[in-house]
Amino acid sequence: MASSIPSTEFASSSSKLPWMYDVLFNFTGDEICNKFVSNLDSGLSSVGFTTFLHHHNAVKPMHIEQPIMDLCRVAIVVFTKTYSQSAWCLHELQKIIEWHKTYCRHVLPVYYEISPSDIRLQKGDFGKDFEATARQTFSRQQLKHGMSRWGQALTKQQISLDGMRAITGAMLS
């Protein structure tokens, strides 16, 4: 399916790798999938975007296969109140941020019923769940380093304004 995004808008993001999908979704939970992500996926698909709807139950836990990520132009990360309860999502966010830095691909955060500051600062219930998930995931020796890596990924997630303009422009036209 042809993409609605003009290739010049993503020239810098397409310089090193070809793509098969316009959008990769990263999220956790069936409820958020049914309430929000599936609607966003349908909306993007209806205007010509090819999407890879990636859910932690779809493939092996802790692992988005790198070739799938490399075949996408944009990652949409849907942050929710339960996002930090998923070690899988936190690992994948870390990979997505590395992918963004390496290949200059766009990462678009969506904050669904949660404040961006709760995510960035790992505070409130999100912060408590973040710490509990890290303690369940990492050994005592790895805990500080693991929490630091995940925390940096949560802190560094930023809206890519060019990517947002391209997506919203295509959806509005």
Image (cartoon, helix red, strand yellow):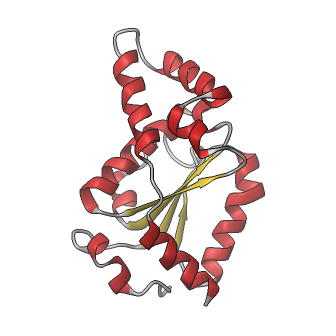
Residue 14 position in % (x across, y down): 29, 73
User: Would residue 22 be seen by someone viewing this image from the given angle?
Assistant: no
Residue 125 position in % (x across, y down): 67, 27
Residue 60 position in % (x across, y down): 49, 41
Say how many tags the image has.
0
Residue 148 placement: quadrant: top left
User: Would residue 115 be seen by someone viewing this image from the given angle?
Assistant: yes
Residue 28 placement: quadrant: top right
Q: Is residue 25 above or below residue 1?
A: above
Residue 122 position in % (x across, y down): 55, 31
In terms of depth relative to the viewer, which is nearer, 29 or 107? 107
Q: Is residue 13 above or below residue 140?
A: below
In terms of depth relative to the viewer, which is nearer, 32 or 71? 32
Q: In which quarter of the image is the C terminus?
A: bottom right
Taking the image as shown, residue 35 lies to the left or right of residue 87, namely right
Q: Residue at x 50, y 76 (%)?
A: 165
Residue lying furthest top in this view?
140
Taking the image as shown, residue 81 lies to the left or right of residue 73, namely right
Q: Which residue is drawn at 50% across and 86% down?
A: 4
Q: Which residue is drawn at 44% across and 49% down?
A: 157
Taking the image as shown, residue 83 lies to the left or right of residue 65, namely right
Q: Is residue 13 above or below residue 64?
A: below
Residue lying furthest bottom in this view?
173
In terms of depth relative to the viewer, which is nearer, 99 or 127? 127
Q: Which residue is drawn at 26% across and 69% down?
A: 17
